[in-house]
Image (cartoon, helix red, strand yellow):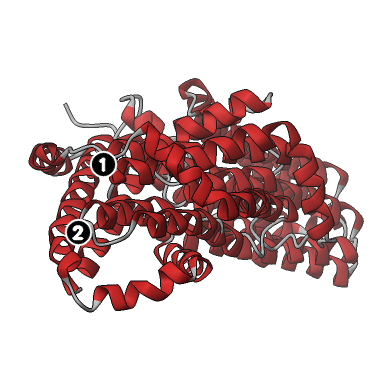
Amino acid sequence: MLNIVAGVCLLLWGVKLLRLGVTRGFGAGLRNMLAQSTNNRIKAMLSGIGMTTVLQSSTATVLIVAAFAGQGMIGASAGLAVILGADIGTTLVAQLFSLDLSMLMPLFMVIGFVLFSMQHSGRMKNIGRIFVGLSLMLMALALIRQTAEPLKTSEILPVILAPLENDPFFAVLLAVLLTWLAHSSLAIVLLLMSFVASGTLPIMLGLYMVLGANLGGTIPPILATLKDHPEALRISLSNLIVRLLGFIPFFFLLPVIEPYIAMIDANHTREIVNFHTLFNVVLALTFLPFTQVVILICKKLVPDRIERDDPKKARYLDLKDLDTPSVALASATRETLRMADIVQQMLEDTITVFKTNDMKLLEKVRDEDDTIDEIYGAIKDYMAKLSQEFMDPKEAQRYVQILTFATNLEHAGDVIDRNLMPMALKKIKKQTRFSQKGFKDIKHIHDLVMESVQLAQSIFVSGDLEMAKQLLKDKQVIREAEISGMAAHIERLGEGEPDTISTSSLHLDIVRDYRRINTYMCTVAYPLLEESGELRTSRLKLKE
């Protein structure tokens, strides 16, 4: 029994390795394929078949589709069509593993180890992971078959199995529980196949437990989406409803159906996987025309809930994306751009506060900095959970860019909150005002810095080299504007303008802090220019 448990653990580990290799290496491409093929139900079902055949997990596909539905990227009806295809996809994988592929196990292990050991190639490492996962699955199935072989002569086993044979409903419940614990209907079907192949498990009992495995596979996605958007939960729930409606007739008609399944292939191993395929194909063909009806039932069971938008909470960081680095990095990019939008709004409000002495707007700016801090903390935590080990070089570089830009945005927000706003508060309390020419100079610097914030966002998204050059050229323009503005300010001091004298220290400090914000924005350009060889190592003139 210990060897069988070890074999099951090895099988589950192999499935997990293979799935991680696929999602981390090719997850973005699979998601794009899924997003582009859901304009009709037949294409959606076919994409579900293809995706799950590659992922080897209908649960993973359901969670991806649920996430898409929760973000409004896919309709619930099309999502259910994808899931119906995903359920067929797992049966195709089971069909493949029902064949004797044990001779490929050592070859897959060697290929996997070589690719996994390669340096500086995230994609190759993930392909290696896929081969290692396949090898472990084949090894586990062989171990389970060999270990289970002597059990068919056991005197204790019939005593254990007799209650299950007499009460098939209890056998179904046991299979549901095992599948839920394993989080993989594929693994349980392969396990049942191995037991039937060794003669340990009677064929009829195995078929009933296949029904249970199909039901149990719906539980993990439901539990994973309970707190998600209602549309995401409806996707998971629709899968359960379809399986329950299909389970009832199959459960009662199984003694009638079994002889016909045996006619296709009398081999009991093939009978298990053929029944698994038949069940899911029948469900897909039956419910594909009625996906909207099923979704309407789910809407009754899971009504829309009113959700208050909390600006301090991250909107785009989904923990389910962490297994796919390219998708997780795209999500972190969107959240960082949201930070940039808030900083831009803070900066825009800042000049209004200096002009109008608006206390309410000042408090709003300070609250926005708290939002910036919360989002930045969420991005840092999210990126910390994202492993760089299996990223390709471009993904690893993007990882650093996101963290760097997010950090500099947070610093820019702090400059506004801790430096500019206290100066605005001092100006309000003392009831001073800038001279007309002095405010014009500040406004000019402000407008240039605003342009640099917008340009930095574009560079962060596009990585455009010409934009990066322009950002550093604009930095020099701001520096020159600061120098000329300071000279004009000193000239006005010499002329004895009262407003200039009363706000002199404020004026100089504000311009200095605007330049600091510009410096933080310019950091997004340096890595691009260094990589292209367009950046000098030093401004100093070197001796000949």
Q: Looking at the rendering, which quadrant does residue 333 occupy? A: top right
Q: Is residue 492 left or right of residue 213?
A: right
Q: Residues within 10 Å of mark 2 (few under 14, many from 20)?
A: many
Q: Which residue is drawn at the image coordinates 86% and 57% (left, top)?
A: 498
* Quadrant of the drawing holding the C terminus: top left
Mark carried by residue 130: 1
Query: Label 2 sits on what residue type?
Result: Ile
- Circle 2 residue: 144
Q: Which residue is drawn at the image coordinates 67% and 33% (left, top)?
A: 288
Query: 86 and 526: which one is in front?
Result: 86
Residue 496 appears in the picture as rendered: no
* Quadrant of the drawing holding the N terminus: bottom left
Camera-nearest label, 1 or 2: 2
Horizontal and vertical percent for residue 209? 44, 59
Q: Is residue 88 left or right of residue 241?
A: left
Q: Secondary structure at mark 1?
A: helix
Query: 313 and 536: which one is in front?
Result: 313
